[in-house]
Image (spheres, helix red, strand yellow):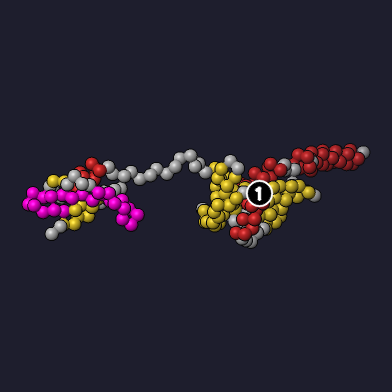
C-alpha cells in the first residue's frame, strides 16, 4: 500500500514538472507569437548592413529582401522566425551606358526638338545633359547614362537676356586719356572699330608742344599711346 502511494506521488510530481516545462516552452512553440513582420525584417537588415531595403517578400517561411548599399544591389534570404540570414548575394548589374543615338531617338520620339546633347560626369555618375525645345519653351533635361531614366527637367528662363557690356562715353574716354597724357585735347574725337573692338582716338597736345594720339578701348578703358613726330 505504501509503495502504491509512493508511486502515485512520484507520478504526480513528474506530471507537474512536465506541465511546467511545456507551459514555459509554449510561447516559443506558438508560431504567431514569434514570426517577424516585414517591417521588423527590414529594420534588422538595414541596422545590420547599413543599407536601404528596396523590396521585401515572404514565401515558405523565408523573406526575400533586396537591399541597396554604396550603389550596389544585394539579394538576401532571411528566416521568418529566427531572423537568421540564410544567404546574401551581390546582384549588381554590369554598368553599361546607353549610346547617344538611343538617347536622341528617345527624345525625338517624345516630341522634343534637340538643341544640344552631351555626356557628362556628375558626382561620379555618367549622365546625358540635353537642351531641348518644347511648345512652352526650352528645357534642360538630365538623363541617367546607364538606364536612360530622366533624372531632372528644368525650364530654361530666356526672359533675362545677358546684359551687354557697358561702352564708355566720350567724356569718360577723354578723362582716361588725360590721365595717361597730360595736355590739351583736340575737339575732333574719333570712334573706330578695329578687329571687332571699338576704340576712341583722342589727340592731345602736351605743354612742351608734343602731340600724342591716345587710343582708348571703348569697353575696358585700356590705353595705347602713339606719339607724332
x%, y% of residue 223?
Answer: 23, 52
Mark 1, secondary structure of its residue: loop
Magenta stretch: residue 210 in it? Answer: yes
Given residues 157 and 224, the one toward you in this image is 224
| Residue 97 visible to the viewer | no
Given residues 66 and 60, the one toward you in this image is 66
Magenta span: helix, strand or loop, mainly?
strand
- Side of 185 where 151 appears, left or right: right
Residue furthest toward the left? 208
Q: Residue at x 70, y 56 (%)?
A: 87
Magenta stretch: residue 196 in it? Answer: yes
> Residue 163 occupies which quadrant of the picture?
top left
Screen quadrant of the C terminus:
bottom left
Residue furthest toward the right? 1
x%, y% of residue 204?
Answer: 15, 49
Screen quadrant of the N terminus:
top right
Given residues 120 and 221, the one toward you in this image is 221
Q: Residue at x 27, y 42 (%)?
A: 169
- Side of 204 where 134 appears, left or right: right
In magenta, the rendered stretch is 190-212
Residue furthest toward the front? 188
x%, y% of residue 152?
Answer: 57, 46
Q: Residues within 10 Å of mark 1 (few under 14, many from 20)?
A: few
Residue under numbered circle 1: 110
x%, y% of residue 227?
Answer: 16, 57
Q: Residue at x 52, y 43 (%)?
A: 156
| Residue 107 visible to the viewer | yes
Amino acid at each position: 500500500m505504501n509503495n502504491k502511494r509512493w508511486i502515485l506521488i512520484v507520478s504526480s510530481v513528474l506530471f507537474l514538472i512536465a506541465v511546467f516545462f511545456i507551459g514555459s516552452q509554449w510561447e516559443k512553440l506558438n508560431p504567431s507569437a514569434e514570426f517577424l513582420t516585414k517591417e521588423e525584417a527590414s529594420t534588422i537588415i538595414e541596422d545590420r548592413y547599413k543599407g536601404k531595403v528596396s523590396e521585401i517578400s515572404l514565401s515558405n517561411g523565408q523573406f526575400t529582401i533586396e537591399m541597396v548599399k554604396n550603389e550596389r544591389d544585394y539579394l538576401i534570404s532571411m528566416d521568418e522566425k529566427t531572423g537568421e540570414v540564410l544567404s546574401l548575394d551581390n546582384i549588381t548589374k554590369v554598368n553599361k551606358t546607353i549610346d547617344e543615338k538611343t538617347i536622341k531617338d528617345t527624345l525625338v520620339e517624345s516630341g522634343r526638338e534637340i538643341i544640344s546633347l552631351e555626356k557628362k560626369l556628375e558626382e561620379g555618375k555618367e549622365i546625358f545633359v540635353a537642351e531641348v525645345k518644347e511648345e512652352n519653351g526650352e528645357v534642360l533635361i538630365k538623363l541617367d547614362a546607364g538606364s536612360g531614366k530622366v533624372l531632372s527637367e528644368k525650364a530654361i528662363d530666356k526672359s533675362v537676356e545677358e546684359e551687354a557690356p557697358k561702352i564708355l562715353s566720350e567724356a569718360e574716354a577723354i578723362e582716361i586719356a588725360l590721365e595717361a597724357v597730360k595736355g590739351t585735347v583736340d575737339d575732333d574725337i574719333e570712334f573706330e572699330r578695329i578687329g571687332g573692338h571699338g576704340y576712341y582716338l583722342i589727340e592731345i597736345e602736351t605743354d612742351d608742344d608734343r602731340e600724342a594720339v591716345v587710343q582708348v578701348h571703348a569697353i575696358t578703358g585700356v590705353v595705347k599711346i602713339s606719339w607724332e613726330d
